[in-house]
Image: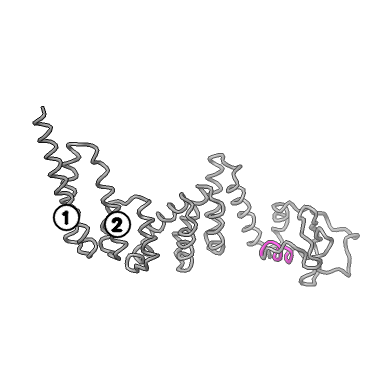
Amino acid sequence: MNSINNWFNNFVRNFESDRTYFKRLFFEYCKNGDLKNAKKYYDKIVLTFFTLLSTHLNFAYLLPELNDETFIIACSNNKVNIASWIYRKRITDKYLLKGFEIALLQENFSVFNWFLHDHSILIKLIRISISINDIFIFNFIIDYCFDNNIWIVLVKAFNICCYTKKLEMANSIYQRLSNYPEINTIIADIIMKFRLSRDTNSNIYKWLHSLGDENFILQNLYNPEKYDEIIQKLNIPSKKNTNSDVIITEKCSICLEKYNFISSCNHYYCLKCFLTYNIKYKNNNCSYCRQIFDLQKCCFIKN
């Protein structure tokens, strides 16, 4: 029995010795960007790995660890051919993010540009940064995508933030997507999925719902036929116009035309100017007296 154990231990040591030798050569080829020889010695390492694995399951951690270490070496030495090759063999999230940070901070532009030009990698990096709340990497990628009109990544990131209920991150993306033609449809789809899952009490759902109302208002600023619906969405009181409401001397405080809206501080606007001023340009103070608007104490006067 002892002789068998000795033989087995010698067998494992020999393979470990070969693996260490192959690994040293492999990393050297990776640092130099020699993909042909790197692949050759990677296969040799894999062969010793599976031989060791078949004899002892404790070696199961070795191969993923090798891929991660190789990826970091490639990113550190700006070897994009090695980085892209080993990435296809699967890298753990932690090391994918670490490799990106190394390429960014060391200004290894060949590898860095490879990251930025692969949309699937950008989406994966965004997903990782959201999961660990890495605001720096998240904002960097979002800003890059916005500056370069990579809408597909921004839309995917917006969806991820909404479904993981990262409100601040979702709002950061929305500020960049607010003029994107399909944003209303995207928001409506997300809202519908929240409703179907009966998850309508979360802050992210309430925020999305308010965005849907805001977009509707902005689209119908100059459409009087939609004013009643807008007033209802904003929960602003309204009343029918009567002779007592007609004050010839009072005009809209902004355009100086006929008014049909009285603010909570008793100043006069037309609804179009008020909505443009308050909703579109986010001004919450009266343009005349600077008091803060209370929409529930305002009044829309219907014709």
Residue ranking furthest to the right: 244
Stretch in magenta: 272-280
- Amino acid type for the residue under numbered disc 2: Phe
Residue 19: x and y in percent read 17, 49
**What secondary structure characterizes most of the magenta part?**
helix
In the visual, does 253 lie left or right of 124? right
- Residue drawn at (74%, 64%) of the image: 274
- Residue drawn at (58%, 47%) of the image: 205
Where is residue 7, by image quadrant?
top left
Is 257 rendered above or below residue 95?
below
Do the residues bearing badges 2 and 1 touch, measured as CB atoms within 8 Å? no
Per the model, the C-alpha gap separating discs 2 and 1 is 15 Å
Q: Which residue is mark 1?
A: 41
Residue 250: x and y in percent read 86, 68
Nearest the camera: 112 or 105?
A: 105
Residue 296: x and y in percent read 77, 52
Is 100 magenta? The answer is no
Where is residue 243, by image quadrant?
bottom right
- Residue drawn at (76%, 72%) of the image: 255
Local secondary structure at mark 2: helix
Nearest the camera: 68 or 119?
A: 68
Nearest the camera: 74 or 155?
A: 74
Local secondary structure at mark 1: helix
In the visual, does 241 lie left or right of 103? right
Which disc number belongs to residue 71? 2
Is 209 rendered above or below residue 1?
below
